[in-house]
Image (tube, rainbow, N blue to C red):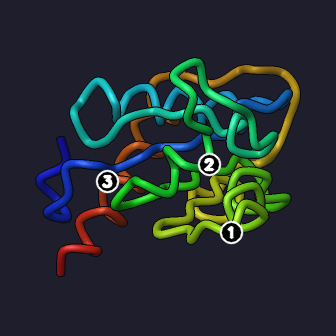
Amino acid sequence: MSQCCGSNNVMLLACSGGSHVGQVANDCARRLTQLGQGKMFCAVGVAGKLDMPNGSTFVDAARAADVRVAIDGCGVRCVGKALESAGLPVDVQVVLTSEMPMEKGYNFDFGEAEVAKAAGLVADKLKSLGS
């Protein structure tokens, strides 16, 4: 999966909230999964401490990851806080409103350029883990 940090178990947990920055975060995680930079995982399952169909829990699966990446749309940091609330470290934290920067809005008017920029930001942070 990820050659950038020497791990083959990079978990991408993204906001998919009701604003365009949440949707950019979600699309970013999907893009990175398609590029083999990690594997998208259900942040809501971790936040809710839900059981998985295989008998494990979402928290157990997240705990087993070598690297947990929280891709949050805004400064509320729902994904990062969900991991912390479950007692899990956030190995890479990205907040799009402050790091891209983007303004939070509700028009869902974003394009490929924003998703690519967000994915590049996450990929750069993953590379820095291996340095």
* For marks 3 and 1 on the same chain, the one whose residue lies earlier in the sequence: 1
- In the image, which disc is placed on residue 59? 2
> Residue 77, position in %: x, y?
77, 58
Q: Comparing marks 2 and 3, which lies closer to the viewer? A: 2
> Residue 50, position in %: x, y?
74, 34
Front residue of 113/45: it is 45
Residue in the image at 19% along x and 64% along y = 5
| Label 3: which secondary element | helix
Q: Are marks 2 and 1 in contact (CB under 8 Å)?
A: yes
| Label 1: which secondary element | loop
Q: Are marks 3 and 1 in contact (CB under 8 Å)?
A: no
Residue carrying label 3: 123
Q: CA distance from mark 2 to mark 3?
A: 24 Å
Does residue 19 appear to the left or right of 92 in the view shown?
right
Q: CA distance from mark 3 to mark 1?
A: 25 Å
Q: Specify the amino acid type for callout 2.
A: Val
* For marks 2 and 3 on the same chain, the one whose residue lies earlier in the sequence: 2
> Residue 52, position in %: x, y?
61, 26
Does residue 103 appear to the left or right of 91 in the view shown?
right
Instruction: Please tell me whether residue 123 is drawn above or below residue 18 in the rendered image.
Output: below
Q: Specify the amino acid type for callout 1.
A: Gly
Q: CA distance from mark 2 to mark 1?
A: 9 Å
Residue in the image at 20% along x and 58% along y = 7
Q: Residues within 10 Å of mark 3 (few under 14, many from 20)?
A: some
Query: Image quarter for residue 47?
Result: top right
Q: Comparing marks 3 and 1, which lies closer to the viewer? A: 1
Query: Image quarter for residue 22?
Result: top right
Q: Are marks 2 and 3 in contact (CB under 8 Å)?
A: no
Residue carrying label 1: 87
Does residue 8 appear to the left or right of 50 in the view shown?
left
Query: Image quarter for residue 64?
Result: bottom left
* For marks 2 and 1 on the same chain, the one whose residue lies earlier in the sequence: 2
